[in-house]
Image (tube, rainbow, N blue to C red):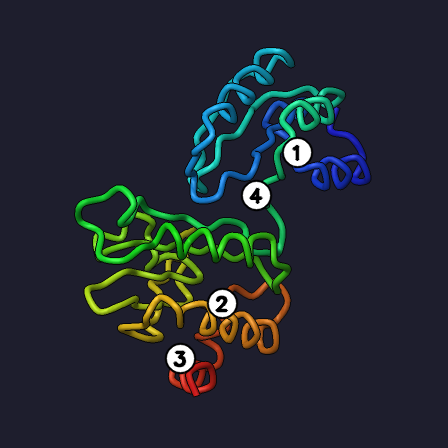
Amino acid sequence: MEGTNETKRDMLDKGAVLQRDKKTYAIAPHIPGGVILDFNILRKMVDAAEKYGAQAMKITSSQRIAIVGIEEDKVDQVWDELGMPKGHAIGLCVRSIRICPATHFCKRAQQDAVTLGFEIDKKYHGLDLPSKFKIGVSGCANSCSEPAVRDLGIMGMPKGYTIFIGGNAGIIPRIGDKLAENVPQEQVLPIVDKIFAYYKENAKAYERLGRMIDRIGFKKVQEDIMS
């Protein structure tokens, strides 16, 4: 019961990902940075999972909570019950912005990565791009959100943020290149705007940022973005 391509596309548009059994779906509501301040959100998710017969709930690597094993004809009902935005778990776009606890909660943090991460999430989550794109924002060099292996990594340091570009994990891992150091918090988003604009203009279809950098050359990319 794999369904037609039209059915698959329709379900993807609904934020539902077909599971291994080829019958049920998983959905992942958007939870910016994995931070939940309204605990009723968790209650609503658990209630919906139980009510509609989900098989499991899974904390994902993108700091979301996926509800797994929902029957196709119940997906719309679950979303209606939750009343939450869909997480961009797939597609050629900004899929996730991982955020560490930073100065809000962590004694080791040196920068306010939570506030910055929320600003980035609000502005860029779901932004259409030439390929998938992941972001990590950390408040110190311990790098709990793994900025060095994200397409865009932002790491808090004593004098500001270090910005990395072009990192990724996967089958051919790549460590991000250091674009800038000691960037004040208020100057991070203008640089991120330049990164996205340059990536959109210069990347080939389905080309990750790191592969584009390898093709063009980091020094030129750095000069073009930071000039």
| x, y percent for residue 175 | 33, 63
Residue 218 is labelled as 3
Q: Determine the CA span between mark 3 and mark 1.
A: 37 Å
**Closer to the camera in the image, 132 or 112:** 112
Q: Which secondary structure lies at badge 1?
A: strand
Does the residue at mark 3 contact the one at mark 4 (Cβ under 8 Å)?
Answer: no
> Mark 4: which amino acid?
Ala
Choose the circle earlier in sequence order: 2 or 4.
4
Choose the circle earlier in sequence order: 3 or 2.
2
Choose the circle earlier in sequence order: 3 or 4.
4
* Residue that badge 2 annotates: 209
Residue 132 is labelled as none
> Mark 1: which amino acid?
Ala
Q: Nearer the viewer, mark 3 or mark 1?
A: 1
Q: Determine the CA span between mark 2 and mark 4.
A: 18 Å
The vertical placement of 85 against 163, above or below, is above
* Residue that badge 4 annotates: 89
The vertical placement of 98 against 183, above or below, is above
Choose the circle earlier in sequence order: 3 or 1.
1
Q: Nearer the viewer, mark 2 or mark 4?
A: 4
* Residue that badge 1 annotates: 16
User: In percent of the image, x 48 and y 36: which residue is there?
Assistant: 64
Q: Determine the CA span between mark 3 and mark 4.
A: 28 Å
Determine the image quadrant of residue 54: top right
Q: Determine the CA span between mark 3 and mark 2.
A: 11 Å
In which quadrant of the rendered image does the N terminus lie? Answer: top right
Neighbours of disc 3 within 10 Å: few (<14), some (14-19), many (20+): some
Choose the circle earlier in sequence order: 2 or 1.
1
